[in-house]
Amino acid sequence: MPEFDLLPRGVLQGTVERMLLDRATQPESRALLEEVLRVIKGMPAANAVQVVHAHWRSDTWCSHCGAVKLYSPDNRKSNLFCHMCAAKMDGGEG
């Protein structure tokens, strides 16, 4: 599965603004950077959180927070994530 970095909009915007001030001497390059800046400002914000990967220790405890696994008639669905810390139970380190 690919990993993606979430870059704060302000960092990217600041970089392009500095390029506009320092390097955009030609009208074409200035117009291009101004368009890039407009696109950055118009991008929607991502509603994202870091995924914590863990596993059930001894098929009972969450390796991330130590919570005891809940048992239900449909264990497959209810135990894909820890009910306490929301760690994804995919065998990762916790």
Image (tube, rainbow, N blue to C red):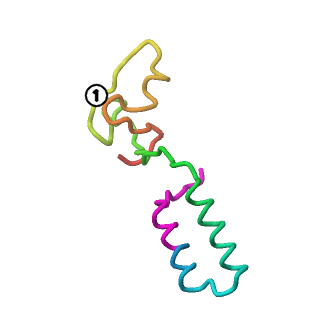
Q: Quadrant of residue 24?
A: bottom right
Q: Nearer the viewer, residue 57 or 72?
A: 72
Asked where in the image residue 79 lies, by quadrant, the reply is: top left
Number of marks in the image?
1
> Within 10 angstroms of label 1, few (less than 14), some, or many (20 or more) residues?
some
| Residue 54 on image: x %, y % | 39, 42
The amino acid at mark 1 is: Val
In the rendered image, which residue does mark 1 sit on? Answer: 68
Q: Is residue 6 magenta?
A: yes
The secondary element bearing badge 1 is classed as loop
Q: Is residue 23 left or right of residue 81?
A: right
Span colored in magenta: 1-15
Give how far across and how far down residue 89 sits, in percent: 44, 37
Q: Residue at x 45, y 20 (%)?
A: 75
Outermost right residue? 28
**Residue 50: x percent and y percent?**
42, 48
Q: Is residue 2 magenta?
A: yes
53, above or below 75, in the image: below
Q: Whole-percent x and y of residue 81? A: 42, 32
Q: Nearer the viewer, residue 85 or 25?
A: 25
